[in-house]
Image (cartoon, rainbow, N blue to C red):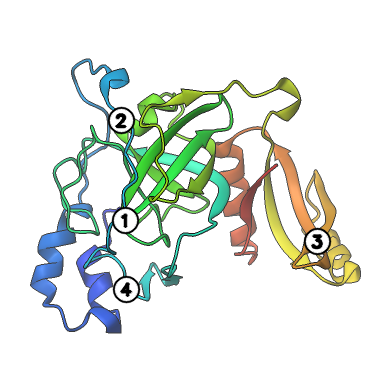
Amino acid sequence: MRLNADTSPADILCMNAHLRRLPCLLLAALLGGCSTGVRDGGPHHPVDVSRIPDAVPRPEPRSRYGNPPSYVVAGRRYYVMRSSRGYVARGIASWYGTKFHGRRTASGEPYDMYKMTAAHRTLPIPTYVRVTNLENGRSVVVRVNDRGPFHANRLIDLSWAAAAKLGMLGKGTALVEVRALDPTRPTPHRDTTVRPHAAHVPRLYLQVGAFVSRANAERLLEHLDVAHAFIAPGLSHQQRVYRVRIGPLPSVEAADALARRLEARGLRDAHVVID
């Protein structure tokens, strides 16, 4: 679990009723390495990531650690999914490396930046997922064994090796699709590349709200008074909805900055949408 340097993950988890039976000293031993001021980065020596195989899905029991029904970080409660079946989501991926190498993950396993692993806020631990970089078409399979990322508008935190194979180290982030895999069905353990068609370049938006009433969506749109805001009609559970979005935005950094400005105005539910 990766948090900012001011937060103790052990303290946070000790506040969860489900985990109060566990000694906080044990939690500190498992998760205390997450709160450190050391800067993150990659290895200081060349590494041929093409020789690092993808994670190979296999049936595993749920981890003894890292799977509470819910937990709270920075005042927000997250609910761990009972099953990953059918999970598909698009969002922003980030990565972590030397800062946490060798430290305990939420599952209790040591983090190895040279293995194909990842952190996710709500997927069961462990879960195998295919992560596709929508900007260059590269795709890898990783094993979720940690909790995070808790940075706003981030979907998944990848190991250094996985990020390197996806070609996202330079930017630090990437627009990705995350798809849970059925471990009973074999998956090739090599990374793949499928070049995206020019007509399907991913576009980044912030979604500020979704309403059954178009009038409510129009009122929010008027209140926003932000350039490139619009109403996107759609369906949700076979019901007509009107989504208020802003974009497309030129970069992840632009989305982060806009989300901070909206939060300062009291709009705290803005989240990234990728089309």
Query: Is 146 displayed left or right of 167 in the figure?
Result: left
Q: Residue at x 22, y 54 (%)?
A: 105
Give residue 126's mark: 1
- How much space separates mark 3 and mark 4, taking CA atoms? 32 Å
- How much space separates mark 3 and mark 2, taking CA atoms? 38 Å
Q: Residue at x 37, y 76 (%)?
A: 69
Q: Nearer the viewer, mark 4 or mark 1?
A: 1
Q: Residues within 10 Å of mark 2 (few under 14, many from 20)?
A: many
Q: Quadrant of the C terminus?
A: top right
Depicted 202 relative to depicted 6: above or below: above
Q: Residue furthest front?
A: 185
Q: Residues within 10 Å of mark 3 (few under 14, many from 20)?
A: few
In the depicted view, which residue is nearer to us: 267 or 87?
87
Label 2, on which residue? 161
Q: Residues within 10 Å of mark 1 (few under 14, many from 20)?
A: many
Which structural element holds mark 2? Answer: helix
Earlier sequence position, callout 3 versus callout 4: 4
Q: Residue at x 40, y 54 (%)?
A: 120
In the depicted view, which residue is nearer to us: 41 or 79?
79
Q: Residue at x 29, y 21 (%)?
A: 49
Give residue 34's mark: none
Q: Amino acid at mark 2?
A: Ala
- How much space separates mark 1 and mark 2, taking CA atoms? 18 Å
Label 3, on which residue? 235
Give residue 68's mark: 4
In the depicted view, which residue is nearer to us: 199 or 8?
199
Q: Amino acid at mark 4?
A: Pro
